[in-house]
Amino acid sequence: MAHEGHERILAVQDAPSGLRAWIAIHALDPQPAFGGIRILNYRSERDALFDGLRLSRIMTYKCALAGVRGSGAKTVVIANSILDRPAAIRALGRHIESLGGVYQTGPDAGFTREDQQVLMQETQSVAHFDVDGGMQSAGDATAEGAMHGILRALQLRSELQVDEITVAIQGLGEVGMSLAKRFLALGARVVAADVDKEKSAAAEKLGVSIVSSQQVLAANCDVLVPCAMGGIIHDVTIPQIQAKIIAGVANNTLGHKSHAQRLKENNIDFLPDFALNAGALIEGSHHFHTKETSCPDKIAAIGDTIEHVLMRSMNDNISTVDAAFAIAAEKVAGS
Ligand code: NAD
């Protein structure tokens, strides 16, 4: 396919429920293609498609970096056109099921646990799901992996001890809240922001200092963790950032790839999202291939990936994003 080599792009519609979505499958070799469902307000079908193409392509690189047998995909659902949410999710589930298992999905931003329950009534092709007493939630798995990556980056910057640092988190959703709890448990100070007042209040009760969404980016902190939407690190926000490490949890954290070079020049370690936020992908794909529900060692290996990326960036004097792409491309070529 013309756009970045995509193998399959499906337009999915269901008029009665108002479902309008794209399923973008970047590659089908190796199979299956893994990628979550993102449900967001989009200005147009074109914007949603662009997002799906971008995210599915990066999933192929994410699989390669994480050592996952599989390729990249993504579903993007236009939230603002939905008329009946459960019916729309069921219709989407039927479309995913009709693909015969070549695409294995899971949650992404805007996709709730209620959506997951409904989706699983229609399709078996859900690689990451919450099982009572079994698999942890995708948000927890992603947070666990991100924490390993951040801790390794802190170790490499030996001046930073975890119980002395301040972590600033933008977005206290599935991943952000889980990360806040983990860093509080390690003795770090956590400041955070969420546009949702209930989530902010819940975090405050745990000991998180709440600031505004703009203030959190400029917070006096050691580690900044964007956990809301992508594209948040850009020309306007970079000069405000005081953190020494930016942990890319939000997919496509940077406004543009070139911002990684700006961060390197400012002596800020940017941990690329497609290297750092692979915890749920690792756990979901492990379950898909083995039927086992937990793989803490594989998730912890994100720390090694982050070290590899940071060392390559330093040794080759390239940005961490270029380093991560180079490592991923080598892995794809070698597989
Ligand atoms: P979520 O929808 O559960 O949480 C996002 C949170 O960000 C919400 O609480 C929302 O209110 C808040 N938010 C939105 N705009 C904000 C703003 N301007 N300022 C402050 N808060 C704002 O999503 P999630 O599952 O926690 O995912 C967070 C990010 O991580 C997304 O970009 C997602 O693509 C990425 N990601 C998630 C996973 C996963 O397993 N859930 C895996 C990989 C990547």
Image: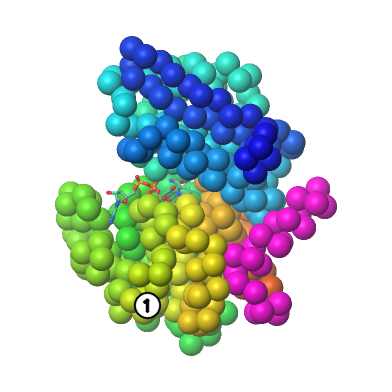
Instruction: Say if residue 108 shows up in the picture.
Output: yes
Residue furthest to the top in view is 16
Count of residue discs: 1
The residue nearer to you, when weighing 93 against 76, is 76
Horizontal and vertical percent position of residue 304: 64, 65
Report the residue at 29% width, 74% height from top. 219
Instruction: Say if residue 104 shows up in the picture.
Output: no
Horizontal and vertical percent position of residue 152: 55, 71
Q: Is mark 1 within 8 Å of ligand 1?
A: no
Horizontal and vertical percent position of residue 99: 61, 20
Q: Is residue 61 magenta?
A: no
Q: Dot 1: few (<14), some (14–19), or many (≥20) neighbours within 10 Å?
A: few
Residue furthest to the bottom in view is 159
Horizontal and vertical percent position of residue 117: 39, 25
Report the residue at 55% width, 18% height from top. 97
Q: Which residue is mark 1?
A: 239
The magenta span reads 313-335
Q: Main secondary structure of the magenta part?
A: helix
Image-based side of 173 in relation to 161, left or right: left
Report the residue at 37% width, 14% height from top. 15
Report the residue at 54% width, 51% height from top. 279
Q: Is residue 333 magenta?
A: yes
Secondary structure under tag 1 reads helix
Against 317, residue 185 (above or below) is: above
Could you say which quadrant of the image residue 1 lies in?
A: top right
Image-based side of 70 in relation to 213, left or right: right
Inspect the image, locate mark 1, and give the three-letter code of the amino acid beneath it: Pro
Image-based side of 105 in relation to 48, left or right: right
